[in-house]
Amino acid sequence: MGKVNWWLWTKMLVAGGGVVWGGPALVRYLQPTDEELFQKYNPELQKRSLERRYEREKEFDDFVVKLKEQAKSDKPIWILQAEEEKANAANTVRQQKLAESLRLAEEVKARREAMRKEAGLPVESGKQGK
């Protein structure tokens, strides 16, 4: 083995330390805080942001609660989330079908009442008693 060049090693350690510690320090120094960004918004955006803050915080809290519940399971979280999305989609489809059937029932009722009016028959009040 040859002679160790201590000056080279010193320069490399200083340069490496500058990159490893100096880079993130520079980013932290240059990156604006949330308050600084908020102050740069125009007044309308500031108002809208303040109005939606509670809603966003609630959504985030709900997400964290769901994530904690899913973490208790033995299944991977991404599988549980996919199953939950399928269940929500099925519920949404079910609700849409229910709303569509209610709308159709109302249309049928309105047509029936219109036909009764045209025929001169009394219009039903909505409740049928037996």
Image (cartoon, rainbow, N blue to C red):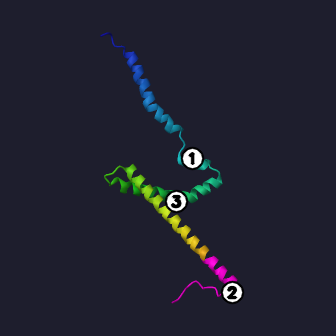
> Where in the figure is residue 86, as x and y percent of width and height?
44, 56
Q: Three-letter amino acid code at disc 1?
A: Glu
Q: Which residue is mark 1?
A: 36
42 or 62, which lies in front? 62
58 or 9, which lies in front? 58
Q: Which residue is mark 3?
A: 55
- Taking 23 as reference, is 44 left or right? right
Magenta stretch in the rendered image: 109-130
75 or 32, which lies in front? 75
> Where in the figure is residue 58, as x and y percent of width and height?
48, 59
Label 2 sits on a secondary structure element that is: loop
Q: CA distance from mark 3 to mark 2?
A: 54 Å
Residue depicted at 44% across the width and 24% down the height: 15
Residue depicted at 51% across the width and 68% down the height: 98
Residue 1's quadrant in the figure?
top left
Q: Residues within 10 Å of mark 2 (few under 14, many from 20)?
A: few
Q: CA distance from mark 1 to mark 2?
A: 72 Å
Task: Answer whether residue 110 is magenta in the image.
Answer: yes
Label 1 sits on a secondary structure element that is: helix
Which residue sits furthest bottom? 130
Q: Is residue 88 above or below residue 128?
A: above
> Where in the figure is residue 14, as x and y percent of width and height?
42, 24
Residue depicted at 54% across the width and 68% down the height: 99
Numbered badge on residue 120: 2
> Where in the figure is residue 75, as x and y percent of width and height?
33, 51
Q: Three-letter amino acid code at disc 3?
A: Glu
Q: Three-letter amino acid code at disc 2?
A: Gly
